[in-house]
Image: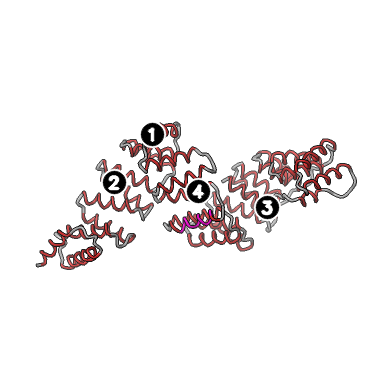
Amino acid sequence: MFDYLKKILEQVREISQSVDDYRKLSPSGAMPAVAQVNQAIKLLKHKKKEEAEALLLEAVELYPANESVFRTLGYFYEAEREFAKAATYFQKALNLNPIKKDLFMRLGYAQLSARQNDEACKTFERGKNVFKSDADIITGYGMALYRLEKFEEARVEFVKAFAIDSHNMNALFLTATIDIMFGDYERAETRLSLLVKVSPTTAHLYEYAKLKNLRGDYESALKLAKRALDTNKNFLPAYILLSEILNTRFEVNEALEWLQKAEDNELFAASLYMARANIYIFQEDFENALIAYRKVLEFEQDKTIDMKILICEILLGRLDGKEETVNALTEGEEGEVARMLLGVWNYKTGNFAKAEENFRKALQITLKLPIVYYLLAKIYEAGEDNYKTEKYYDLAIEKNPYHLQAYKDFVEHYLKLEDFAEARFKIKKALKLFPDNAYFENLLFYTGFRLLNSRSSDYNVKELLKLAEKLEKNSTFLYADEKNALIRGLE
């Protein structure tokens, strides 16, 4: 949440990094302090930052009562993104000029950027006392409350700010993000629909796309996310959102194409490769998931990623020398990824009771991957618990209707039980998703043949023979003896 909030902060207050900003701070005149500031600005114009910084630091020692010197140094550190230092000097400038709105704003946002959230809250609160009904100050106060996770209070402040100034799009936007957080989608929809009409910025379009995705309106979400990229082709979150929506719709190739476009635009980031890994792990393509997770580690070191890499390796059957690492990574960990890691390790090493316990705990948290349901089905099948076997195969297929192996194993389960009617029902469902699949078509013939004794009719026999002929033409037919028995039965 707060990484995205940081982006909102940057949108709300663009931090100037040009020499023009410094020039605006220095009024004309011959006072020594002003002359020294102007000299520093000339040095900045020629990109002599170290000399300019030294000159400004000297100026604040020589002229401790000159607000513009402190303010200029604050701007300097703000432009260098050294926000804690910027806050220090904006605070000193504000102490000298406690009724200047710009200083309240600069100080408050510098403190937010430096993660000094409590201090920022106090700064904006003081600003509210000086500027009773200023929408910008109130918005800043709301931002500080947001960062302190006082979301309901923040929403109240944002609503106040927009009521004072209906052109304050930032307040309206931030109110909508909190509406979404609290599940108030209708109100968020009203605010965001207005925003994209009057101010279709990248952030507004993207947030509206996220809302549409949450509400299951995938077509609208895709259109809005693409519009966000039209406004800024380098906005990585929109590429990731597009991939997530398309993966939800099981349009995997197109989802991966959007991530490839982001990579082609050189938007290299941990989040890009994590999004790719998430798609692969959902599709149970563990080899490619492993590659993507390793790319994530090039950008950030994270124990969770180490665990995910190990999960992929274990599911690929690479168990040698892994036990010690599994134990070290999961010691004292109770999260879903640690449970998943222990689950796959115990499953692959034959400890099904422990594997079941860990998978079920993972599901109780948030993990809802098809592979977890599938492996639980395999565990219950090995334990001959037919009810749970069927329940978890169904859940695996529900999570991923294109889970080919789950369909195959589910059909094989019913064949072992000689429940040919249920097997045939699953085969027909599978063939709707995997048309002309020789494996399922052969079993469709076989189950039909086995059911003929109880449901005999010339129509069924003719349909089965027609299917057999089709498979024979493709050289994929496996039940020649059963076909011959049908033909003899017609004689």
| Residue drawn 48% across the image and 55% down it | 243
* Mark closest to the chain's N terminus, 1 or 4: 4
Q: CA distance from mark 1 to mark 2?
A: 32 Å
Front residue of 319 and 417: 319
Q: CA distance from mark 2 to mark 4?
A: 34 Å
In the image, the segment drawn in magenta is: 254-263
Q: Amino acid at mark 2?
A: Thr
Q: Amino acid at mark 4?
A: Tyr
Q: Nearer the viewer, mark 1 or mark 4?
A: 1
| Residue drawn 36% across the image and 53% down it | 398
Rendered image quadrant of residue 72: top right
Element class at badge 2: helix
Q: Is residue 88 above or below residue 9?
A: above
Q: Does the CB distance between marks 1 and 3 fall below 8 Å?
A: no
Q: CA distance from mark 1 to mark 4?
A: 27 Å
Left-right relation of 329 to 231:
left
* Mark closest to the chain's N terminus, 1 or 3: 3
* Number of the label disc, if any, that sits on residue 321: 1
* Number of the label disc, if any, that sits on residue 389: 2
Q: Amino acid at mark 1?
A: Gly
**Residue 191 in view (yes/no):** no
Q: Does the CB distance between marks 1 and 4 fall below 8 Å?
A: no
Report which residue position mark 3 lands on. Answer: 161
The crowding category of the residue bearing disc 4, from other C-alpha atoms within 10 Å (few below 14, some 14 to 19, many at least 20), is many
Front residue of 242 and 305: 305
Locate residue 448, reporting x and y percent: 20, 60
